[in-house]
Image (spheres, grey):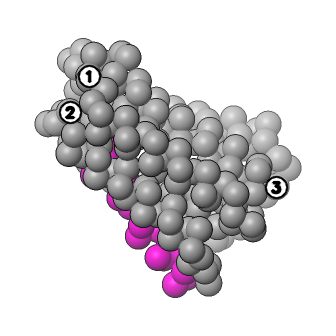
Amino acid sequence: MRTAEVGACATIYRLNLVPATLMAVIVLDEHLTPGRALALSAAIGAIALIGRGSGTIGRTGLILALAACLLRAGMALGFKHGLAAGAGTSQLLFVNGVAWLAGAVAWGAIGRPAARTWRRSDLAWGLVSGLLVTGNVLFLTLALAAAPLTQVLPITQLSFVLTMLAGCALFGERITARKLGATMLACGCVLLLAYP
């Protein structure tokens, strides 16, 4: 997200419900309905529109956003598997937090040299982001304990629309016809997955 637009990154990242849906079909024996198949096609169209947009995300940004998308899908599937196996939400959140901390320490130790230099804003924005992601994971876990993954994820993924609008308001990102089309396809994907 350092060089790519936040709206484009968020749209692709939030389409993690596509690989999560495919994994749920394969691993959790959920069904691939015609509506879900159409949703997957809409998601691929959205990614293609954003990925081809000049200056929107670029090849490296697209690859990194898709990697984040796949990892996020795996996280949701892991949470659902853990809950199905009887793990408690508190335990899942604790272990998830420890894993995040270990990853951050490793990145700081072996990552880019800039990761070893600290500014006051790093701490402030890291804290804000950390609190938001903690709330996100908490409510995702509680929702997954109460409802099927293929219904929870589409609802949680609609945040990309808010992110795109915030990117326009806060960072001066433009809404192009290509981005608008990708957003409409992504919304269609979410709705088709939410109401199979």
**Do residues under tags 3 and 2 come within 8 Å of each other at their CB atoms?**
no
- Looking at the rendered structure, the kind of residue marked 3 is Ala
Residue at mark 2: 148
Mark number displayed over residue 30: 1
Residue 120 located left or right of residue 166: right
Q: Label 3: which residue?
A: 114
Question: With respect to residue 130, does 71 lie above or below?
Answer: above
The magenta segment is 152-170
Q: Mark 3 or mark 2, which is nearer to you?
A: 2
Alpha carbon distance from label 3 to label 2: 41 Å
Farthest residue toward the right? Answer: 113
- Mark 1: which amino acid? Glu
Percent position (x, y) of residue 77?
Answer: 37, 28
**In this view, 165 is above or below 115:** below
Q: Main secondary structure of the magenta part?
A: helix
Q: CA distance from mark 2 to mark 1?
A: 9 Å
Q: Dot 3, crowdedness within 10 Å: few (<14), some or many (≥20)?
A: few
Where 156 falls versus 182 (above or below)? above
